[in-house]
């Protein structure tokens, strides 16, 4: 079996917008007008915290 690595880049702000449009509640949000790295947090159905973090 051959393993293939790939990279997909999404801005955290785009992910935040999509999740909110889907009705998913976020624990913390990023400012949409800010530039640079950002992060958001949410909680899954099992109570686990999820961090989506963007670095430069």
Image: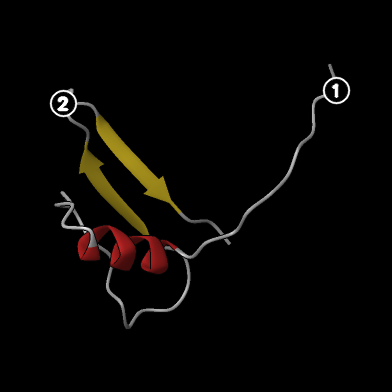
Up-down relation of residue 47 to residue 21 (above or below): above
Badge 1 element:
loop
Up-down relation of residue 38 to residue 34 (above or below): above
Task: Say which quadrant the N terminus sits in.
Answer: top right
Q: Residue 32 sits in which quadrant?
A: bottom left
The mark nearer the N terminus, 1 or 2, is 1
Residue 47 badge: 2
Task: Say which quadrant the C terminus sits in.
Answer: bottom right
Which sits in the foreground, 38 or 24? 24
Q: How is the image coloured?
A: secondary structure
Up-down relation of residue 39 to residue 51 (above or below): below
Q: Residues within 10 Å of mark 2 (few under 14, many from 20)?
A: few
Q: Residue at x 48, y 56 (%)?
A: 54
Residue 34: percent from left, percent from top: 36, 79
Taking the view exactly as shown, the residue that stands out farthest to the right is 2
Left or right: residue 33 compared with residue 54:
left
Badge 2 element:
loop
Left or right: residue 9 compared with residue 26:
right
Which residue is labeled 1 in the image? 2
Mark 1–mark 2 Cα distance, whole angstroms, equals: 35 Å
Which sits in the foreground, 44 or 22? 22
Q: Residue at x 34, y 42 (%)?
A: 51
Q: Residue at x 40, y 68 (%)?
A: 14
Numbered-mark total: 2
């Amino acid at each position: 079996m051959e393993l293939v690595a790939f990279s997909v880049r999404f801005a955290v702000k785009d992910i935040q917008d999509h999740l909110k449009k889907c009705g998913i509640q976020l624990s913390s949000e990023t400012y949409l007008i800010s530039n640079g790295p950002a992060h958001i947090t949410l909680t899954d159905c099992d109570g686990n915290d999820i961090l989506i973090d963007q670095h430069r």
